[in-house]
Amino acid sequence: MITGSNFLTDLSNDFAKLLVNGDNHDVIIEAGEGQKRREFRVHSLILCTRSTYFGTTLSKNWLRKEKGVIVFRKPNISSDIFEILLKYLYTGLIDLDILQGTDLLRLLVATEELDIQKLNAHIQTHMISKQTEFIQENAIDSLQTVIQYEKCTILKDFCTDVICKEPKLLFDSSKFYSLNESILKLILQQDDLAIEELEIWQYLLKWGLTQMENKINVDNVTNWTLENFEQLEEILHDYIPLIRWFHISPKDFWRKIKPFKKLLPDQLYEDIIGQNLDPETPPNTVEVLPIRCPPSNSCLIKEKHFALISSWIDKKPKNFYNFKTKPHSFELLFRASKENFDVRAFHQLCDNKGPTIMISKNKYNDKIIGGYNPLSLKAYGSGVDTWTESSDSFIFHFPIPDSINSAQISRVKDSQYAISYRTNAGPSFGSGWDLTIENSKLSCNLISSYPGISDFITSGTTLNLEDYEIFKVAIIDIQPRLMIKCLSILRNDRKDYMYKVNLC
């Protein structure tokens, strides 16, 4: 018995043959430029039915005709991308998995121009689910590509999230100084930009200086002329209101921003000084923007590390979370360098807070060692040192700090003594203190509960720490925004038998 799906497959195959042989074509489209320019012999009825762009364009009287055949050019769309789009328009089939990230961006731009809306949305969700690493590595280029197109909001939002969570991808890039102004404004408007406000101002100042015709040195502000200040103020005028001035410490403002007083509106400057002198009286003439709320605020690791740790917590063997899909939040409780490695401050800020992770950084080689405690930190019995049982704790290591592919993990074996509470020490793991922090030193006294850590640290080792951080771990509800969009696309696609999807 022949089913309906067999008929659809046959129909798709027949239309594919029609595209290849071009029988009875009434349109010739020249795509691409130079040696890569190609002619495609196609059919206006199919194109106009499948794309509103072609429905409008092919009805124009100005189109050139040769022997009754419409001829027009699309030099801005490469021939290889145009061929993929034609196959989709004719057959309803497309395999995005075989395309690289750069090709997907080119394809996305072409669908925007040709107003192929369903494929446009499908490419965006595909890139988010299958090309996360490419987007993270090319967030600036990706954002500069999609920001000018109104239908690319899914990918634009994702790229913005990437930059907000890893802002140095933008600010430390050589591309920052030639950045599209609309992108800079978009990023500065974000409430979750994970970088100190003073740093944002310093980067913005450097960006503004590179836009000036006459280059001046930021370190010699005392030598600036009034004309220098006026020119720079004009460049930065639209960005000044986007800085969260009232969340910069009075000391930093006085030392590092006051020299640039002439760049700020007089009333804003007075309100900032007034707020710094009298914090209880809010300014009346200037809107006070809320403090930015970065997702993790770690000085030692990045969002991709937290996503991997989140995957370990859920014991995922593969298909690890990315920063967008991780189901855990990580709230900073303690940063040792800010508390002078004081153990009393550690216990004050971290005891009885629920599950936590510890992240430490070696002072001399930047290697990261940490551990996960699925229990609330507290005295587990009487005495200075006590232990408790857990089968879910683990210790981990990033020998190459910026690479999650270098990660090593050791899950607990002797669960009875998995976690230790030490009144006079920081976070501690294992019956023999497989890992423990005292003041600014991390020690491995005796490997017993976590035998796997012998792959990256040996018994009797003591490391000097540059810093360590403690984060509270909590389960969060995944933001449904992207899923809602995906479901909406799926609903629409059910109405279109020509469209084969593989979403989310």
Image (cartoon, rainbow, N blue to C red):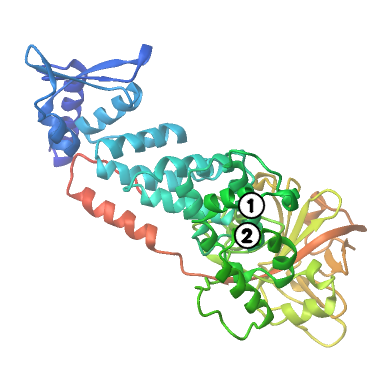
**Residue 205 image point, x, y percent:** 63, 52
Front residue of this view, candidates 253 and 401: 253
**Residue 417 image point, x, y percent:** 78, 72
Instruction: Identify the residue at horizontal 52%, vertical 70% (top origin).
Output: 289
Using the image, determine if residue 304 lies above or below residue 106.
below
Q: Which type of secondary structure does the marked residue at label 2 adopt? A: helix
Q: Which type of secondary structure does the marked residue at label 1 adopt? A: helix
Where is mark 1, residue-wise? 226
Where is mark 2, residue-wise? 262
Label 1: few (<14), some (14–19) or many (≥20) C-alpha neighbours in 10 Å: few
Point out which mark residue 163 bears. Answer: none
Instruction: Identify the residue at horizontal 28%, vertical 31% (top origin).
Output: 85
**Residue type, label 2:** Lys
Label 2: few (<14), some (14–19) or many (≥20) C-alpha neighbours in 10 Å: some
Using the image, determine if residue 277 lies above or below residue 133.
below
**Residue 453 image point, x, y percent:** 79, 55
